[in-house]
Image (cartoon, grey):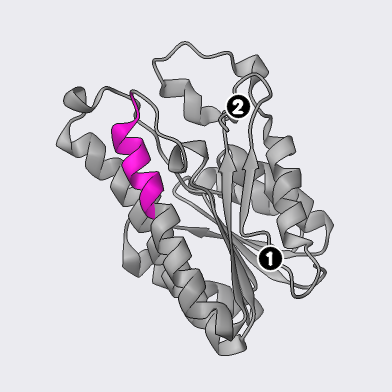
Amino acid sequence: MEGKVAIITGATGGIGQAIAPLLSDRGVKLVLAARRSDVLDVMTTELSGSVAVPTDVTHSEQVNALIEKAIAAFGRVDILLNCAGVGILKQAGQLSPNELDTMLDVNLKGSFYASQAASAVMRERKSGHIINFPGTLGKYPMAMAAGYCASKFGVVGFTKCMADELKRFGVKFTLCHFGGVNTPFWDEIALKVQRDKMLQPDTVAAAILYALDAPVGAVPNEIILQPENHQFL
């Protein structure tokens, strides 16, 4: 992966923050995107060959500007990791319109905007890899997660459509169904969970590297990784 350029949205969160140094160590040039510019600035001082682009993925114009700035900085985009996400877990009848909109805007629309903009650049180069993160709740339904599942099932749907549309142009897609990852996602969740038994960010980061390291001509289209105490089959 030496010399490749990767955009990471949600770079200041658990999975994004875990994968960034691993890619940097492999010589990947990083474009780090998130809303927290102060954390982004700290990350760029620690990771050589990285630039920070404060971005709110819910605004398509900011996402388009992110891609443009990546091109201006490094001349290309090879990898997109859509790590930005938000979760509100409540019974469907208790979910407010604003809470539903928040999840649809960040999880679904944000991932769509970034995939759309990055894939346009990759299509021209006839090369690229986009990784989206619907998690296990983008594959298996769960009580208290109707709105969240709606946003994540949507990610699965558009990713599969884009993969079919762009496979002839050398653009690869991977869906990561990671379940129960111990990240700040759970800080505001009012459910009793055993965070010590969850997957750790460095574990899922290794799975992402596996997808990116696949031999030429091979694509891990879906990766399912779950804690051994909380398996869905």
- Distance from the alpha carbon under mark 2 to that under mark 1: 24 Å
Q: Is residue 101 left or right of residue 173?
A: left
Q: What amino acid does circle 2 point to?
A: Gln
Task: Magenta stretch: give its range.
Answer: 144-154
Residue 231 marker: 2
Q: Position of residue 174 (x, y in %)?
A: 59, 59
Reading the chain from its start, which is encountered first: label 2 or label 1? 1
Q: Position of residue 25 (x, y in %)?
A: 83, 55
Looking at the picture, does residue 139 appear above or below residue 194? Answer: below
Q: What amino acid does circle 1 point to?
A: Val
Identify which residue, 10 or 230, lies in the foreground. Answer: 230
Q: Is residue 68 visible?
A: no
Q: Is residue 71 left or right of residue 197?
A: left
Q: How many marks?
A: 2
Question: Which residue position is annotated with label 1?
Answer: 219
Q: Is residue 132 visible?
A: yes
Picture residue at 77% right of the left edge, 63% below the top:
214
Picture residue at 69% right of the left edge, 40% below the top:
204
Q: Report the magenta stretch's main SS.
A: helix
Tell me if residue 151 is in the magenta stretch: yes
Circle 1 SS class: loop
